[in-house]
Image (cartoon, coloured by chain):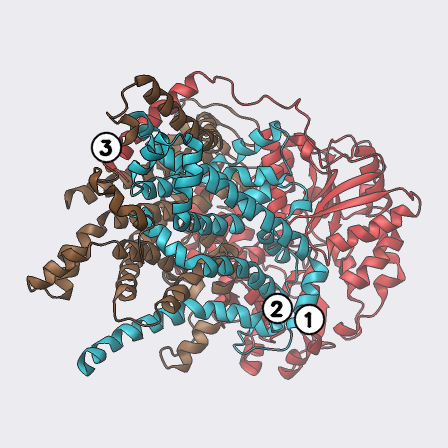
Amino acid sequence: MKKTRTLGALGAVMSLSLALAACSGGGGGSGEDETTGASGGTGDNSLTVWAWDPAFNIYALEEAEKVYQADHPDFTLEIVETPWEDVQTKLTTLAQSGETDQLPDIFLMQNNAFQKNVINYPDIFADFADSDVDFSEFPESVVSYSTYDDVNYGVPFDNGTAIGAYRTDLLEQAGYTVDDFTDITWDQFLTLGKDVLAKTGKPMLTGQAGSADTIMMMLQSAGASLFDDEGNPTITDNDALLAAIDMYGQLVDAGVFVEVNSWDEYINTIVNSNTAGIVNGIWISGSIQSAADQSGKWAVTNVPKLDGVDGATNYTANGGSSWAITPNGNEALATDFLNATFAGSTEFYDTILPASGALANWLPAGESDVYSEPQEFFGGQPIYADVLTFAAEVPSNNTGAYYYEGRDAVSVAITNILNGADPASALEEAQSTVEFAMG
Amino acid sequence: MSAPTAPTEDRASSAPPPGTKESPGSSKRVPLSAIARRRSLTGWSFIIPAAALIVLVNFWPMIQALFLSLQTGRGTRLTWAEPLWLNYQRLFEDETFRLTLSTTFIYLIIQVPIMLTIAMVLANLLNAPWLRWKGFWRTAIFLPCAVGLVSYALVFRQIFATDGLANDLLIKFGLLDANVNWLGQTGTARMVIILGLLWRWTGYNMIFFLAALQNIDRSTLEAARVDGANGFKTFWYVTMPQLKPIILLCAILSTNGTLQMFDESFNLTNGGPGNTTMTVSHYLYNVSFRNSPNFGYAAAISYAILIIVAILAAIQMKVGDKRD
Amino acid sequence: MTKTQLRRIPAYAFLSLAVFLSVFPLYFMAVSATNTSNEVVASKLLPGSHLLENFQTLVDSQPLGSALYHSSVNAIATTVLALILCSIAGYAFEIYHSRAKDAVMAILLLAIMIPFAATMIPLFRLFAQLGMVNSTFAVIVPLIATPFLILLFRQASRSFPHEIIEAARLDGLGEVSIFARIYLPTMKPTLAAAGVITFLFSWNNFLWPKVILVDNAYQTLPMLLSNMRAGYVTDYGSLMLAVFIVSVPTMVVFLALQRHFAEGVTGAIK
């Protein structure tokens, strides 16, 4: 490598790029009319779908396909397994480059990311305004994730209702039952938790360090968010957030809540009996049940509520996802398919629940016998029916376009606060980070 | 181990040393400028496919990114910035950019010198005439490089988990009293990332150094020994100067790699705790794909990375020059 | 004699340590492939008996064969094309050397410094407009011409005696024949080195394939790995087996070519 040559080239390329730039004026924006081998819109009776979990949402799709095929024998689904991160990357790339004809007909989207995408990329969504889907059959808090400007853009699928799941055997050792943990406040939880820790040596909860999951669940349980109705960040002067962070700090300091570093370690604490309980979305029950030796030792109840915060409840949610449809020419079929299955088939939900633990958001599904069946793993408790009653109580939460910025900034603030930073100034910093990102 | 052209080396003895400016393209032995011109054209036609492709997949998108960097807005709703350099101005006010940039520099300043030093020591050991099982040592040390980025991040995360292997072993050997939360604290999490980089790339650089060592003119080493220089002196005053070009190349490539580093930050620590292990490229990814997408600003960040890499490369070449 | 041998002990100790540290994570990976998910998470260090079950789970849940096929096709095609394009360009930069070509080379080297995340979207738009989304072609094209490989070949060409070329010209050989029949056969080590580097890079390439392959029919192994971690529940035994399977071909390629690899790099580093 010749030094001087490369040095000179640095200057050369800068001027070259400028020169080329000058003579290639309107390079961007063209080409939407080019038709490429689209993966979506493959035919009259076929739909392409992006989803990511073979044991969960992909399995559900396969069952939905069978249900729909009963009335539409020619119908087929082409399911493209795509992890959520990749769904987001691909959607962004397609939308940003204007190549929307590469979109699938249906894709699954995390509820937290829904508004961000609808607001930034309206072109990749078709709405359900003229459809037969009855959104009143879903809990309002869930529908609100995929609603923007009073228009529905998503059919809710995966239920994210939060549960408090506890190890009855460990509670018993400390002299408690799951009833002692039902309808309580976080203050009471802390007191009970210290006692359980002293008597069993196990923390009550674990969670991922640097993840704002628990804080966000506490926030939503009081109907609070990081943004107001106009979408402005409300990280400072947010009583619910302050109370949640304060409580979280106390739980961690007392050792009642143990932070681990990764998702794997988190699951590990459950599987290896290193925690007496878990507070998370109902979907965590799949991971809990992977520890077959713990069958019969778990019970499910609602989550603690914040003390001294207006509107605090014992109900909240974490995660969950909804189906979106794209304006690819197959909207009618896609809508009808979703309406006949995810928004209209008890038979369908009865099939997928026992096999995959995919709990419906569609309320009529809860009336079926399958939902009230006692679950052996949870000591004979009919947890799915119980959770559906929680679901109806969950307060709505504002996500907006900057949800991830807000959430990440709060995560950083929590880490700093746990390391001794002053909460007020850490939150001010978070607020200004979000304001900067929005600016 | 012989150089690739050894069999024909002696035939070239009357020619000017290879690699000097006197190459046949401009050779005086060709009388007709027409032939010279045709050869030059042949040369270009050999170069153009690769060069055109590089322009197409690297420079052309980068030029588009330049335009993008002068626009603001989210998603596809972009407008020309006011003033045009607004996104570049924004860089100086962005705390997260500052944090990720300084983190990236910490990786660079600690990891690259350590890696190159270890690689140099290993290369010298492997080059020692008395060493046995050379192939074994070389292969084993290079192997990590064959492992994919996603794979090695997974393995390292498992090893440095709080209840993971690193803690188990260190406690067993009495080096630690209690589990260390490696990935949960800024200092140790950065250290794990640096260890990961060292693990994966030291062998790669070692191969380059080893190759350069094998090319060193033995007579210069003999001369030094006759003059009574000891092993270290010989290495420092005779070997090192001859290795300078390759050290420079490895340093520039490593600097470039570190500044563009994404996978380790993304897969190993996910930027945590509190964004303190996040690299600039990871931040660039977040601005584009995780946050409300701000591609104008992302393009400005990418130009910042490009300019920093170019400046560092220029400095390294300058420093490399001075020691001549 | 014994004294010098004694002095060599630290050297062997240091090498042993380096080898241990290098190989240990690989050992952990291999052992984990034979254990159950819970055993992997508990960092079990002894081989288990769950290998077949892990393999069954892997094959049942993922299109392993198809991904293996596509990864191989991509990596091999990339490597072959890269070797052809870059060797001929590197050769030309040296043999038909001129100031203008030097300048072009220097500019091309700048491409190494361009962060991929920045070029990804314009690049995607480019391929979409050419109608090449979802093709092997689109996956490999951005990788086949790299300034680094051209540099490698240019440096290696410096030690190639120009007299041979002159002699061949006098014998009436065309320029392409000289390159293909006389020059290339002497470049085996450099080809091996460049081949290993390209193969490694292509095999492990992740971000670009995942963006350009909208359809999963062309899915590659790194994409398959990332799919395996996408669900609510991850089976670490079969994941580690997949990680192992993904790593083996690159190791085999390196082992097969390693002697030439070192030589090839040597040729380039004069």
Q: Position of residue A202 (x, y in %)?
A: 56, 77
Mark 3 against mark 1, which lies toward the viewer? 3
Q: Amino acid at mark 3?
A: Lys
Q: Taking B271 as reference, is A113 above or below it?
A: above
Which residue matches tag 3? B21
Q: Taking B33 as reference, is A294 above or below it?
A: below
Q: Are marks 2 and 1 in contact (CB under 8 Å)?
A: yes
Query: SS for tag 3?
Result: loop
- Residue B319 as seen in the image, left or right of residue A167: left
Q: Amino acid at mark 2?
A: Gly
* Marks 2/3 same chain: no
Q: What's the residue at 29%, 61% (across, down)?
A: B123
* Marks 3/1 same chain: no
Mark 2 against mark 3, which lies toward the viewer? 3
The cyan-tinted chain is C
Q: Is residue A16 visible?
A: yes
Q: Position of residue C262 (x, y in %)?
A: 36, 56
Query: SS for tag 1?
Result: helix
The red-tinted chain is A
- Rendered shade, chain B: brown
**Quadrant for the N terminus of chain A in the image:** top left
Query: SS for tag 2?
Result: helix
Q: Which residue in the rendered view is the most extreme toward the right?
A: A71
Q: Nearer the viewer, residue A121 or A404?
A: A121
Q: Amino acid at mark 1?
A: Glu
Which residue matches tag 2? C237
- Label disc, if present, on residue C53 of the rendered structure: 1
Q: What's the residue at 80%, 52% (across, down)?
A: A62
